[in-house]
Image (cartoon, rainbow, N blue to C red):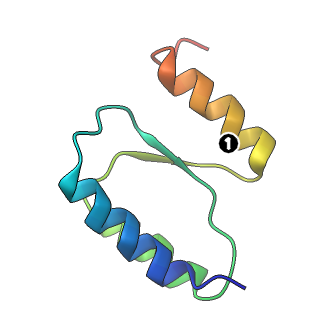
């Protein structure tokens, strides 16, 4: 299982180095998921949480289209 807290910290660090303008679509599953969610919630990253890969794909398309759906 993935350590979600480590992944979340990596997302925060990468986001600081990149010019990302759209919200990230993130699916969190694994060990320490609550800590990962806390790390992301306390960051300034705009993100949308997805429940599964289909949901993530749908939300990524919506974000790319400007949330019009």
Q: Is residue 59 left or right of residue 25?
A: right
| Residue at figure coordinates x 37%, y 75% from the top left | 9
Horizontal and vertical percent for residue 30?
Answer: 69, 80
| Residue at figure coordinates x 45%, y 16% from the top left | 66
Q: Nearer the viewer, residue 32 or 1?
A: 1
Horizontal and vertical percent for residue 40?
Answer: 39, 66
Horizontal and vertical percent for residue 64?
Answer: 49, 21
Q: Is residue 51 left or right of residue 31?
A: right
User: For mark 1, what is the residue?
Assistant: 56
Q: Is residue 26 left or right of residue 8?
A: right
- Tell me where residue 32 sits by quadrant: bottom right
| Residue at figure coordinates x 69%, y 35% from the top left | 57
The vertical placement of 40 against 39, above or below, is above
Number of numbered tags placed on the structure image = 1
The vertical placement of 26 against 9, above or below, is above
Q: Nearer the viewer, residue 47 or 12?
A: 12
């Amino acid at each position: 299982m993935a350590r979600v807290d480590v992944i979340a910290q990596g997302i925060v660090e990468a986001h600081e180095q990149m010019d990302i303008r759209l919200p990230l679509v993130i699916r969190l599953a694994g060990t320490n998921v609550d800590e990962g969610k806390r790390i992301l919630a306390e960051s300034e990253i705009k993100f949308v949480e997805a429940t599964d890969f289909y949901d993530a794909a749908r939300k990524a398309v919506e974000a790319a289209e400007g949330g019009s759906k």
